[in-house]
Amino acid sequence: QQQVKQSPQSLIVQKGGISIINCAYENTAFDYFPWYQQFPGKGPALLIAIRPDVSEKKEGRFTISFNKSAKQFSLHIMDSQPGDSATYFCAATPTGRRALTFGSGTRLQVQP
Amino acid sequence: DGGITQSPKYLFRKEGQNVTLSCEQNLNHDAMYWYRQDPGQGLRLIYYSQIVNDFQKGDIAEGYSVSREKKESFPLTVTSAQKNPTAFYLCASSITGSGNTIYFGEGSWLTVV
């Protein structure tokens, strides 16, 4: 059962452009929404995270937008750089369970 | 250096054999996790443990077993009952409590030959 749906599966963006990745969830008990970045052959690393009591969180070039009523959240990468080329995963944690449920991932390629 | 160490990085298994993947952390985290990664399917939770001598099944626990005898260690055994074990396995840990950052190891590649 896929509880977090992520799109698109792959994304190509020109250097300097905006990369946008979307996620939707079904379980209203989710209360923590992180984004992870993974380079080939490596483990994922936390990029940025948000809780449902705020609608937006920004850290440098990375912004999470959160829409609680629509049960959607998205990652925006401003001024995308070739070094941002990686696979990005959204995730969520339901109340009462500590482990993350992940989306299927988005492979981002930023062309120079 | 503090972190999560997984070994081996690459492992080949013959059909019918059990194999054990090691995971050690020196972050003093109470919670530890095992995820499986297949192309296009994201990360799926196999088992997790919030405290020593206790663990819970995740979404795809069939064919796997774990133990948590020490806070620092959470080994995963891939048994012969796992029908499609070829995958990238990721161990992770966190401070117990919802919303705390989960840190991942570098992963182990398991291939059935």
Image (spheres, coloured by chain):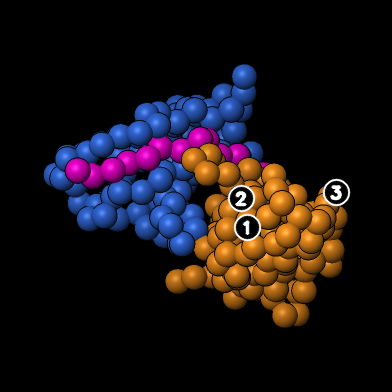
Chain colours: A orange, B blue
Closer to the camera in the image, B46 or A82: A82
User: Which residue is the site of mark 2?
Assistant: A86
User: Where does residue B19 sit, x and y in percent of width and height?
Assistant: 25, 36
Residue located 37% across and 40% down the image? B109
- Residue kind at label 1, given as amino acid type: Leu
Q: Report helix, strand or loop for mark 3.
A: loop
Asked whether disc 3 touches disc 2, contact meaning CB atoms under 8 Å apart, the reply is no
* Label 3 CA crowd tier, 10 Å (few <14, some 14–19, many 20+): few
In magenta stretch: residue B100: yes
**Separation of disc 3 and disc 1 at Cα?**
18 Å
- Residue kind at label 3, given as amino acid type: Gly
User: Which residue is the site of mark 1?
Assistant: A108
In magenta stretch: residue A1: no
* Chain under callout 1: A
* Chain under callout 2: A
Residue located 40% across and 37% down the image? B108
Q: Report helix, strand or loop for mark 2.
A: strand
Asked whether disc 3 touches disc 1, contact meaning CB atoms under 8 Å apart, the reply is no
Q: Are marks 1 and 2 on the same chain?
A: yes
Closer to the camera in the image, A48 or A86: A86
Q: Which of the marked residues, 3 or 2, is nearer the chain's N terminus?
A: 3
Asked whether disc 1 touches disc 2, contact meaning CB atoms under 8 Å apart, the reply is yes
**Separation of disc 3 and disc 2 at Cα?**
17 Å
Q: Which mark is residue A60?
A: 3
Quadrant housing residue A3? bottom right
User: Where does residue B31 sit, x and y in percent of width and height?
Assistant: 55, 40
Q: Residue furthest front?
A: A112
* Label 2 CA crowd tier, 10 Å (few <14, some 14–19, many 20+): some
Q: Which of the marked residues, 3 or 1, is nearer the chain's N terminus?
A: 3
Q: Is residue A69 visible?
A: yes
